[in-house]
Amino acid sequence: MKGRVYLDHNASTQVHPEVVAAMLPYFGERFGNPSSVHGFGREAREGLEIAREQIADFLRVAKEEVIFTSGGTESDNLAIKGVAGARGSGHIITSQIEHHAVLRTCEVLEGQGFAVTYLPVDGDGLVNPDDVRRAIRPDTILITIMHANSEVGTIEPVEAIGPIARERGIPFHVDGVQTFGKVPIDLERFGIALLSFSSHKIYGPKGVAGLYIRKGTKMVSVQHGGEHERRRRAGTENVPGIVGFGKAVEIRAREMDAEAVRLTALRNRFWAGVQSRVQEVRLNGHPTRRLPGTLNMCFRHVESESIVLGLDLKGVGVSAGSACTSGNVEPSYVLVAMGVPLDWAMGSVRATLGRENTDEDIDYALEVLPPLVERLRSLSPAAVP
Amino acid sequence: MNYSETLIDHFRNPRNAGMMREPDGVGEDTFDGCGDLARFYLRVVDGRVVDVRFQTYGCGPTIAASSAGSELATGRPVADLVAVSEQDVTAAVDGLPDERLHAAQVVAGALRAAARDYLSRRSAPSGSEVRQHA
């Protein structure tokens, strides 16, 4: 039996060895506080600014437009609350399938008197740009739509939504946590004013992320204290993490395109293999407009978590579409918004591939998954005629 | 999530899975929160359960608890089985995480329903009993 196969890269990734090597000196001799004026501080500051430059170059923006945060969730919170706080009141447009970092933040703002429109998606998980146009009101202060959904991988038409926002003078925030470093993002052409992006989805360390803030975007800070990050985000920067993030982005710049081609082929082979071996299975997400390594499938008459546990016992790590907490299994809100029938949605499994996955990994997954599904179905009363 | 070795063993190798033709008692229970469903079939001789089969749709712990519950019921007097508790089922899988206690609830509920079905068939023939947790 093969050792362990990790197919959960949308959750997190293994830190690239070159990234670890780049970070190490900043735990040791370059440990200083980047705000300090002495040499120790300057060394740390230098690491920080090199990383900022690596990321700015990758995004083709000015260094001053990139700030560092503690994670994608903080970036989303800062972008949305920052714009909302600068305006004081108004209307926000988002979608029903955003990450909780966006949805919960919008809900909190609703509690503070802001109005929020949660746009529906179609069966493939796509937001319709015409819906965005129709939802705009005279008091709309922000449009926030994700670049790609983490569960199903559907890539939203941000290139069509951004120009609508720009035309109306409304800042456009994009949660790019799942796409940054995986698929191209053209901030200028897409009309993006704010972009959230994260390190640990692209082989960098956890606890570090970024927010691109286009020059001139009016926002307030959410966290108060010192004058770090151009007064956008108080708090001593996570220097080793940021240095690692910069390195991870530099590596993505050279590996991203070829990897996207390879992972798309691998993912498609996985899906074709599942389809030919398992009955009553469906693909979730857009057939082509989708993150390269993302494959979300529903197995009818089987519950997600039993598949996840069964695969885990075979050394394969995937994630469940439905999550059971305190005996309350919620079908994925993303699949529900896409109109996936409940008896299918309860059996959704997400496999997300990454740089270390090989053909052999997929062969192994295809060897263990079909008999597992068959065995679980044989136990299920629903599957028995 | 950490599961006991006993639970994992029942999940990997479920005992007594499947249907039973013309059972002496049938009962099921569902958990509204997650749609988990367990159904038990009993063969009873002289007031004692001699054979059990189950069919379960649910997460790993619910499948494992069904298998353990089927062993728990085998050989037991039906009069006892009507009082089987969640704690009995939880103990049979060597414990459940707090977030998975519903597995024992569904299985205990289905076993009790099957036992009651047997008893009610004896007094007056009727269909199988179905219970539902809120």
Image (cartoon, rainbow, N blue to C red):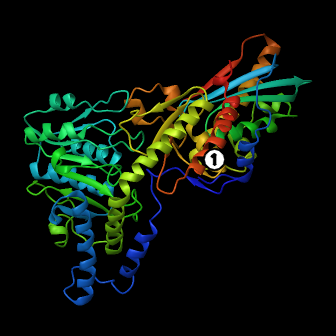
Label 1 crowd (10 A; few <14 / some 14-19 / many >=20): some
Q: Looking at the picture, which amino acid does disc 1 mark?
A: Tyr
Residue A34, located in which quarter of the rendered image?
A: bottom left
Q: Residue at x 54, y 34 (%)?
A: A272
Residue B18, located in which quarter of the rendered image?
A: top right
Place of residue A349 in the rendered image (x, y in percent of width and height, measured from the top left) = 52, 39
Which one is nearer the viewer's eye here, B69 or A93?
A93
Extreme residue toward the right, this view: B46
Q: Residue at x 40, y 70 (%)?
A: A19
Q: Is residue A236 visible?
A: no
Which secondary structure, mark 1? helix
Q: Examine the rendered structure and indicate whether residue A143 appears above or below residue A41.
A: above
Place of residue A311 in the rendered image (x, y in percent of width and height, measured from the top left) = 62, 46
Q: Is residue A125 visible?
A: yes
Which one is nearer the viewer's eye here, A9 or A34?
A9
Chain where mark 1 sits: A
Place of residue A197 in the rendered image (x, y in percent of width and height, measured from the top left) = 30, 55
Q: Examine the rendered structure and indicate whether residue A98 appears above or below residue A137.
A: below
- Badge 1 is on which residue? A364
Q: Examine the rendered structure and indicate whether residue B41 appears above or below residue B12.
A: above
